[in-house]
Amino acid sequence: MGNIHVAIMMGSKSDLPTMEETAKIFKDMGVSYEMKVLSAHRTPRETAAYAEGLKDRGVKVVICGAGGSAALAGVVAAHTTLPVIGIPVESVLQGLDSLLSTVQMPPGVPVGAVAIGKAGAKNAALLAVRILALADENLNAKLRDYSDNQRQKILNEKV
Ligand code: RP5
């Protein structure tokens, strides 16, 4: 894969432990990505410029994690037509603040919000892979393997 297929953005380096869960899945599935720290409130111009340039660079999906007053996913969605997935990062209010900030977008500026924290970070990656797999049968096979492994793990559970 020459191009970067997914851009993973986060509002602060402190979000990295959550966002690494996203990256881990892309590494396992061989999806190319880049990670970028940009803040919706503290680097607004740079955030807009980065988001505006993604489509021309061949990026297909953007994943944004932010905590607190989490504007990043919404601001990025306002500056691109690419699908944007928002991860509410845990924060002082256990991520409820981040969740509401990420999910309550005005109609017309869509953000696909996932669960708070690491569970959301994993699902954001899997959702992005599902989007990419629409045009990539090899990736689709990896998703089927992932589901099969998950299924086997449950079936092998002894209580
Ligand atoms: C950090 O502030 C958070 O975890 C989050 O990503 C970030 C939000 O940044 P702003 O866009 O509000 O500057 O503490």
Image: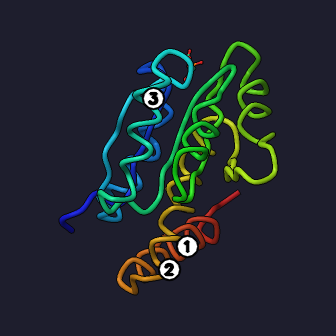
C-alpha span from label 1 to label 3: 24 Å
Instruction: Pick whichever of labels 1 and 3 is earlier in the sequence.
Output: 3
Q: Give the answer, above or below, for where 152 lies relative to 25.
A: below
- Residue denoted by label 1: 147
Queried on whether the Cβ of the residue with tag 1 lies below 8 angstroms from ligand 1, the answer reads no
Q: Label 3: few (<14), some or many (≥20) within 10 Å? A: few
Q: Label 1: few (<14), some or many (≥20) within 10 Å? A: few
Question: Could you tell me which residue is drawn at 64 percent across and 29 percent down?
Answer: 71
State yes or no: discs 2 and 1 in contact (Cβ < 8 Å).
yes
C-alpha span from label 2 to label 1: 5 Å
Quarter assignment of residue 92: top right
Tag nearer the camera, 1 or 3: 3
The number of numbered discs placed on residues in the rendered structure image is 3
Q: Give the answer, above or below, for where 145 lies relative to 86.
A: below
Quarter assignment of residue 141: bottom left
Q: Quadrant of ligand 1?
A: top right
Left of 33 or right of it: where is 113? right
Q: Quadrant of the C terminus?
A: bottom right
- Residue denoted by label 3: 17
Q: Secondary structure at mark 1?
A: helix
Across and down, in percent, residue 108 comes to 75, 54
Question: Could you tell me which residue is drawn at 44 percent across and 37 percent down?
Answer: 9
Q: Label 2: few (<14), some or many (≥20) within 10 Å? A: few
Left of 109 or right of it: where is 48? left
- Residue denoted by label 2: 144
Question: Could you tell me which residue is drawn at 67 percent across and 53 percent down?
Answer: 112
Amino acid on which the number 1 mark rests in the picture:
Ser
Amino acid on which the number 2 mark rests in the picture:
Arg
Amino acid on which the number 3 mark rests in the picture:
Pro
Q: Quadrant of the N terminus?
A: bottom left
